[in-house]
Image (tube, coloured by chain):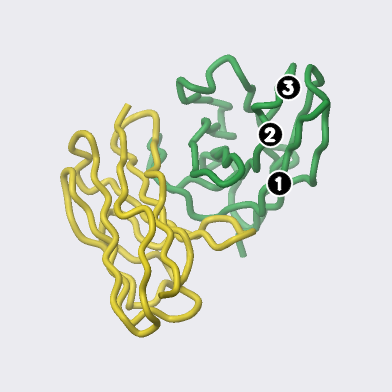
Chain colours: A green, B yellow
Amino acid sequence: EVQVVQSGVEVKKPGESLKISCTASGYSFTDHWIAWVRQKPGEGLEWMGNIYPGDSDTRYSPSFQGQVTISADKSITTAYLQWSSLKASDSAIYFCARVEGNGSGFYYLNYWGQGTLVTVSS
Amino acid sequence: ETVMAQSPSTLSVSPGERAALSCRASRSVGIYLAWYQQKPGQAPRLLIYGASTRATGIPARFSGSGSGTEFTLTITSLQSEDFAVYYCQQYDTWPRTFGQGTNVEIK
């Protein structure tokens, strides 16, 4: 059974750094892209970027390029999303999800984590 | 960026009735279109991919149609568990983009 489990709630101050995690199991971790999706309170979904754990190939949506870093450690089947300096506007729920595709393609999201709530407030 | 526009923003439907949700792309995405359902406090769930293929375990009352720039998600005979927000997402171009969502509420 495919499972995707994310780290817990985070409360941070502006300017602090943060790294949240996404641990997958039940399939070959290196064979599927993992994506990160942001959902601000009361708003829709935004695809931030994705990583292929097999070779760490990473793609960022233009809106998020330079704002976050996506990484993965295939030895522990875990992907990460990190910030070096948080802003209040980063407050949101962050979902990770396994991406369905073929070969190097990454298409839609089939197995989702439960979400990580990040609150940034002074 | 391919902009996805969903309509209506809110759809009020009585249980047992049919709902038709629209998704329009700013440029052709072929059939590279997925639909998701999200309930409050939960992660989204994949319903449809390839514009019309139901994901594993999705009931037959959910169907998708369309190609190019115009797509429809139809839910026949709405059940209580179907009241939720529905999102479309294109995967033809980068970046991948979602519509703003349609909230299907009880009438």
In the rendered structure, are the residues bearing label 1 and label 2 in contact, judged by CB atoms less than 8 Å apart? no
- Residue A91's disc number: 2
Q: Mark 3 = which residue?
A: A86
In the rendered structure, are the residues bearing label 3 and label 2 in contact, judged by CB atoms less than 8 Å apart? no
Q: What chain does mark 3 sit on?
A: A
- With respect to residue A51, does B43 lie above or below? below
A27 horizontally vs B26: left or right: right
Q: Nearer the viewer, residue B10 or A11?
A: B10
* Nearest to N terminus: mark 1 or mark 2: 1
Mark 3 neighbour class, 10 Å CA radius: few under 14, some 14 to 19, many 20 or more: many
* Nearest to N terminus: mark 3 or mark 2: 3
Q: Secondary structure at mark 3?
A: loop
Q: Secondary structure at mark 2?
A: loop
Determine the residue positioned at 38% across, 58% down.
Answer: B10
Mark 1 to mark 2 CA distance (whole Å): 22 Å
Percent position of residue B14, x then y: 37, 79
Q: Mark 1 = which residue?
A: A23
Residue mark closest to the camera, 1 vs 3? 3
